[in-house]
Image (tube, rainbow, N blue to C red):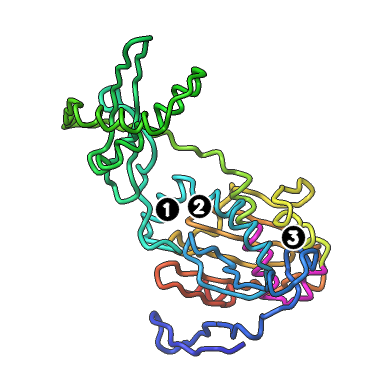
Amino acid sequence: MHFTLLKKTLNSDQWFFVWTADLEDYQMTLCIICKGENPVSKENPITDEHIVPEFIGGSLIVKNVCKVCNSRMGEGFEGKLSNYDFYKFLRIRHNIIGKQTNLPFLLAGSYEDDDIGKFQVLPNSDLFVTPSFIIHADENRVDISMSIDRSELSKAEDYLEKKLCRHFKAQGKNVSKSNLSKRVRELIKHARIEEQTKEKLQIARAIDLDFYDYQVMLYTKIVYELAIFHFGEGYINDPIANKLRLVLKNQQLDASLHGEFPLRKQSLDEFFDNEHHWVMFFNHLCFIKLFGFPAVIEFSERGSMFSQEEKIVYKFCYKTLSFMKLPYLEQMRR
């Protein structure tokens, strides 16, 4: 590890250290999540892990989680949490790109309108009409009404042929593919095409806020992985650390773990703003605040070798993608 010396902006007579780490110092051969349950191999290497996930602006990268566990967390609570509109809104508000090339668009999704039927709002804010069909058939006649986006007119024959094939199959009728293709071409050729435009389109979207478990797992992940970064790999053998690890491995909360989420008494707010992510180790507890939402999680037993007598603060800036480590008293004076 190495230290970078920077001068404080508020008081030119004082200095503080920004602590960064050489990746090689934290390259482990044992996964801190499964502890070897998924053996490290060429197919399952130890991978780069963002202690604070990228989707909330994390930049501290260590190499201590195997590919299997990394993928499970990414597809599990991390990925699911990142897809909630609440977190998309936070990314937009704070201009956090993350792994994506663009900021998310909150209204992206599938909708239905009385006039134009089903449609999608794409991530780039464009509208796309989902192909839909109304089929009225009797022994002598088949009437078909099809709605399709203008951009997909060239695919109309293909869509209609597949739809009719499924329609006749459901009725137990065998239709020659060549005959069906011929009839579809004739239908498209002689079809009456009407272009419909809607001046005003109202969109209503319900926002799901039922992500408590995933959010607690996110806070747990940051506390556990940062504790290993801070105290060293020996912390993995701590009894409380093992409980935190199993929460991440099994993606299931442990009621025996002590903490408060969310933290109701916010007496530390004057020292920790809402424009950064904060983590502070003190005694056997860890204070963590993401986007202004604080919590406290027990990370070790009271009086253990990892109990932190001097309060140590980690400050993560999602605007500059940087972080610093400093004593609590230093943060109070700032």
Q: Amino acid at mark 1?
A: Leu
Label 1 CA crowd tier, 10 Å (few <14, some 14–19, many 20+) = some
Residue at screen point 29% across, 47% down? 125
Q: Amino acid at mark 2?
A: Ser
Q: Earlier in the sequence, mark 1 or mark 2?
A: 2
In the image, 329 versus 212, the foreground residue is 212
Element class at badge 3? helix
What secondary structure characterizes most of the magenta part?
helix
**Horizontal arrangement in the rendering, residue 142 relative to residue 28 (left or right):** left
Residue 90 bears which disc, if any?
1
Label 2 CA crowd tier, 10 Å (few <14, some 14–19, many 20+) = some
Q: Earlier in the sequence, mark 2 or mark 3?
A: 2
Element class at badge 1? helix
Magenta extent: 220-237
Q: Amino acid at mark 3?
A: Arg
Q: Earlier in the sequence, mark 1 or mark 3?
A: 1
Residue 2: horizontal and vertical position, in percent?
Answer: 58, 89
Residue 82 bears which disc, if any?
2
Residue at screen point 27% across, 45% down? 126
* Quadrant of the snapshot with the N terminus: bottom right
Residue pointed to by mark 3: 245
Residue 168: horizontal and vertical position, in percent?
Answer: 45, 22
